[in-house]
Image (tube, helix red, strand yellow):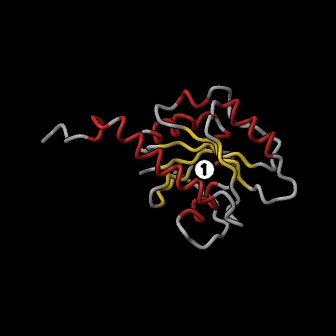
C-alpha cells in the first residue's frame, strides 16, 4: 500500500505521516519526494509551482491512493477545479489542523470538493482526532482498489 500526499507547504503532510506511522512529531521540511514506509511525501513547492506538476504526476504512478492535503487554517487554495481527474487512482481529501482555533473546516472542505474529492477526512496530527478513521479508510480503499485492479498486480510479464 502506497499513499501519496500532495499539498502546499506547511499544510501538514509530513506531520500527518509522522502521526500515522507512530513516529515522534517534529517539524521536518520536505525538500524532495520522499518514500517514508507506505507513504510518499511531496514538497509543497511541487504543488505550488506548476513546473513541478509533471513530477507529481509521474510519482503518483507509484501510489495506490492520492491524498490532497488542505490546511484548514489557510485561506489559500492551491488545488485547481477537477484536479482529481489528473490521477488514475482514488483521491481523498484531508483537512489538517482542525484542532486550531482559526480552523475553518467548511472553507477548506469546499476547496477539496472543488478539486473533485468525494471522501474528505478532517484530522489533527497533534491531538490524533480523526487519524484512526483516516487510517482505517485508507486501508479499506487500498484493498478495494487492488481487488478491482487485480490484473495489474498479477504475475510479472517477464516470467
Mark 1 neighbour density, 10 Å: few (under 14) some (14–19) many (20 or more): many
Q: Which residue is the extreme one toward the bottom?
A: 24
> Residue at the spot x=49%, y=49% of the render?
3
Query: Between residues 116 and 18, which one lies in front from this camera angle?
Result: 116
Q: Where is residue 36 in the image (x, y as percent from the top left)?
A: 48, 60
> Residue at the spot x=40%, y=46% of the render?
143
Would you say residue 45 is visible in this rendering? no
Which picture quadrant has residue 150? top left
100 on left or right of 37: right
As helix, strand or loop, the secondary structure at mark 1 comes to loop
Q: Where is residue 60 in the image (x, y as percent from the top left)?
A: 47, 40
Number of numbered discs present? Answer: 1
For the C terminus, the image quarter is top left
Q: Where is residue 125 in the image (x, y as percent from the top left)?
A: 67, 62
Q: Position of residue 98 (x, y in %)?
A: 76, 55
Query: Between residues 51 and 26, which one lies in front from this camera angle?
Result: 26
Q: Which residue is the extreme one toward the right?
A: 102
Which residue is labeled 1 in the image?
Answer: 43
> Residue at the spot x=54%, y=56% of the render?
135
Identify whether 69 is placed above or below 78: below
Amino acid at each position: 500500500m502506497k499513499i501519496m500526499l500532495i499539498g502546499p507547504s506547511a499544510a501538514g503532510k509530513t506531520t500527518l505521516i509522522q502521526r500515522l506511522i507512530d513516529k515522534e512529531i517534529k517539524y521536518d521540511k520536505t525538500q524532495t519526494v520522499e518514500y517514508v514506509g507506505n507513504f510518499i511525501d511531496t514538497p509543497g513547492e511541487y504543488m505550488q509551482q506548476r513546473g513541478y506538476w509533471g513530477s507529481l504526476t509521474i510519482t503518483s504512478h507509484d501510489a495506490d491512493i492520492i491524498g490532497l492535503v488542505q490546511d484548514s487554517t489557510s485561506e489559500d487554495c492551491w488545488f485547481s477545479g477537477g484536479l482529481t481527474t489528473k490521477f488514475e487512482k482514488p483521491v481523498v481529501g484531508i483537512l489538517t489542523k482542525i484542532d486550531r482555533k482559526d480552523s475553518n473546516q467548511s472553507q477548506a472542505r469546499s476547496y477539496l470538493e472543488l478539486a473533485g474529492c468525494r471522501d474528505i477526512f478532517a484530522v489533527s496530527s497533534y491531538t490524533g482526532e480523526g487519524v484512526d478513521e483516516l487510517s482505517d479508510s485508507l486501508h479499506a480503499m487500498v484493498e478495494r482498489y487492488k481487488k478491482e485492479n487485480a490484473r495489474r498486480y498479477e504475475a510479472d510479464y517477464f516470467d
